[in-house]
Amino acid sequence: MEMNNGANLPATKASKLLTLALALLAVIYLLQMASPLRLGSDSLVLLNIGASVADGHGFLYHGTPTHFPSGYPAMVALLNHLGLASSWSFILMNCAFLGVALGACYSFYRNPLNLSPALAIGLCCLITLSYVLVKHVTLPMSDVPFLGVFTLAVLSLSRIRDQEEKMKWKWLLLALFLTATAITVRTAGVALLPAFAWVLGLPLLSGFDEFRKKHPAVLWGSLFGLVLFGLVTGCFISKTQYFAEMKSVYFQDGVSGRLLKNLIGHTTEIGEIAINVPAAKAPALMKPIIPLAGVPLIGLICRGVWLRRRVFGVLEIVLLTYGSLIFVWPWVDARFWLPALPLLTGFAAVALVDAAKTQIFKFTEIALFVWFVAAGLAALTYSTRISWSGNRFAEVYGDGALRPTYRAAFAGQTNGVVNSDAMVLLKRYDTRTQNALTHNGI
């Protein structure tokens, strides 16, 4: 007994230290609530739709329906009705969804991925240090809420059946609710549907002959339901604006040419995630390395999936479905991978744990870990500096496209082109702007 306790002591200490590190990272994330309202192209539309809903005009942008899903604007409208809608509450909401995502991550890292408690907590820390998450947790957009709902839905789907393949109805109902919610937040939530179909169809796959003989009506009814399910899902996707835009791009570039561009572009995104530096901010010498860095990470993830081929299930299906969805998507942005980040990290860890048995890549793993953490801390420090930049926010935030608007909102300066949509939102949701207007007697 004493020997077991002694053996477990280092792992226990590691878990405690990593838990402390995760708590410190949580505090730093909460410090971002000091940030003025950070606006971008999508956030301008989403917040305007949310304001329209709150004012009783429906899900409209300048009086016109859009292709944006209704989930995030509905959250904004709810905060409006509660009298809490402000930059700090948008960031706090993102942090809450991030907390939900990390809790779900830890659960499925432990089971079904069977990673150690220390490694599971460590992976949660690495997720919070990803520059993609650091960037988007401060933005009033649907990315982080979708991460929370999507990850919790994956966990729920993985819990629907126990080891004896018996249905757990509470998890089924929760997964159904979360899947529907995920689709309303981001259309990409449809990536959960194949896993849902898989879980429901497991009895048909695991005793097909016996089930066919005993319950032929149920069998054919289930098969018919799955086919109908697929057709309805396909029709839903084909009617979306996203599908129409994607189809036009494929028509212009040709299918083979477009798929090749997608492969290069999305591999580059994964390279950015692997080295934890966006291509736009990378030094010139590093830029050629970024697409190449994506290749070994993809290899690791595939290796992790392969190692679990005998227990193939929900996590593998969601990763393959979502990954396929992204690789046919003709636009490039690393944030598209944010919902899959917990799965990418988890399966890469499965492969690395297996590789660690040979000790071949130990030095490389340590070097990459140190680099990733250092880059993540640099991104978090940079974001925190922006959040607490005070009167200099207009000068340090973004690419400068909205700089004249922030100057006008914070200091009444009128030089440059002011974005009217952004100004309306700053007056409505940004405390610094409201204080400036009050000070100027407006």
Image (spheres, grey):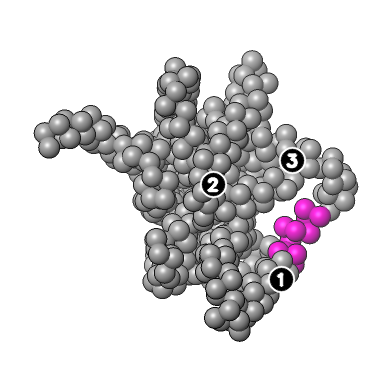
Q: Considering the numbered disc 3 on the image, is that residue within a helix, a strand or a loop?
A: helix
Q: Residue 38 carries which label?
A: none
In this orientation, does residue 254 appear? yes
Residue 290 covered by magenta stretch: no
As drawn, 437 above or below 261: below
Q: How far apart are marks 3 and 1 (CA)?
A: 26 Å
| Relative to 53, 114 lies left or right | left
Q: Earlier in the sequence, mark 3 or mark 1?
A: 1
Q: Nearer the viewer, mark 1 or mark 2?
A: 2
Residue at the spot 74% in from the left edge and 40% down from the top edge: 262
**What is the three-letter code of the residue carrying label 1?**
Leu
Where is residue 85, by image quadrant?
Answer: bottom left
Query: Mark 1, residues whose alpha carbon is within 10 Å: few (<14), some, or many (≥20)?
Result: few
Report, in whole angstroms, how far the alpha carbon at label 3 lies from the one at label 2: 27 Å
Provide residue 183's location: percent of width, then percent of height: 58, 63
Mark 2 is on which residue type?
Answer: Arg
Magenta residue span:
237-247
Q: Between disc 3 and disc 2, whose residue precedes?
A: 3
Q: Main secondary structure of the magenta part?
A: helix
Percent from the top left, x then y, of residue 225?
A: 63, 76
Identify the disc placed on residue 262.
3
Q: At which x and y percent is residue 363?
A: 44, 17
Which residue position is annotated with label 1?
Answer: 231
Circle 2 SS class: helix
Residue 40 is at least partly visible in this image: no
Q: Residue at x 43, y 26 (%)?
A: 356
Pointer 2: what residue? 309
**Could you tell me if the residues under marks 1 and 2 are in contact, i.e. CB atoms within 8 Å?**
no
Name the residue: 79% across, 38% down: 260
Dot 1 or dot 2: first in sequence order is 1
